[in-house]
């Protein structure tokens, strides 16, 4: 399951996943930024806590990608907290 946390003026939506577990037992979350295009989607996925980019597809600029990484780094504890709580409760 994923939980939306942001909508940007260019149509990009930010979502974070439930907590997953690797074979090693390490917990992880994936933060996905995605915006619709005429031919599909621009997609950028970052895995926490490693901050590894696990999927990059489309035409996000280097500046946009840097901003997404900053969002992931600055919000890591937020994403883990709310993934444990089952997402954000937005009215």
Image (spheres, grey):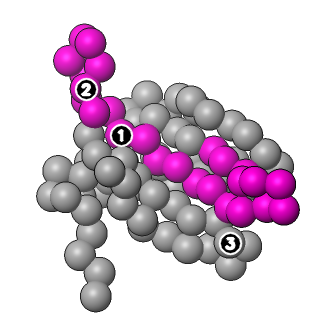
Q: Residue furthest left?
A: 85
Q: Report which residue position mark 1 lands on.
A: 29
Q: How far separated are the C-alphas under marks 1 and 3?
A: 23 Å
Q: Earlier in the sequence, mark 1 or mark 3?
A: 3
Q: Report which residue position mark 3 lands on.
A: 11
What secondary structure is found at the residue carrying circle 2?
Answer: strand
The front one of 38 and 83 is 38
Q: Position of residue 28 (x, y in %)?
A: 32, 33
Q: What is the magenta segment's predominant secondary structure?
A: strand
Residue shown at the point (66%, 48%) measured from the top left:
43
**Residue 40 image label:** none
Q: Position of residue 11 (x, y in %)?
A: 68, 72
Range of residues picked out in magenta: 20-44
Residue 37 is a magenta residue: yes
Q: Report which residue position mark 2 lands on.
A: 21
Q: Earlier in the sequence, mark 2 or mark 1?
A: 2
Residue 79 is a magenta residue: no
């Amino acid at each position: 399951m994923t939980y939306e946390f942001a909508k940007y003026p260019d149509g990009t939506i930010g979502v974070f996943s439930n907590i997953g577990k690797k074979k090693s037992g390490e917990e992880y979350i994936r933060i996905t930024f995605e915006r619709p295009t005429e031919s599909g989607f621009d997609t950028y996925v970052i895995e926490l806590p490693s901050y590894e980019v696990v999927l990059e597809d489309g035409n996000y600029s280097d500046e946009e990608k840097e901003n997404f990484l900053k969002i992931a780094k600055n919000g890591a504890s937020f994403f883990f907290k709310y993934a444990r709580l089952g997402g954000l409760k937005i009215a």
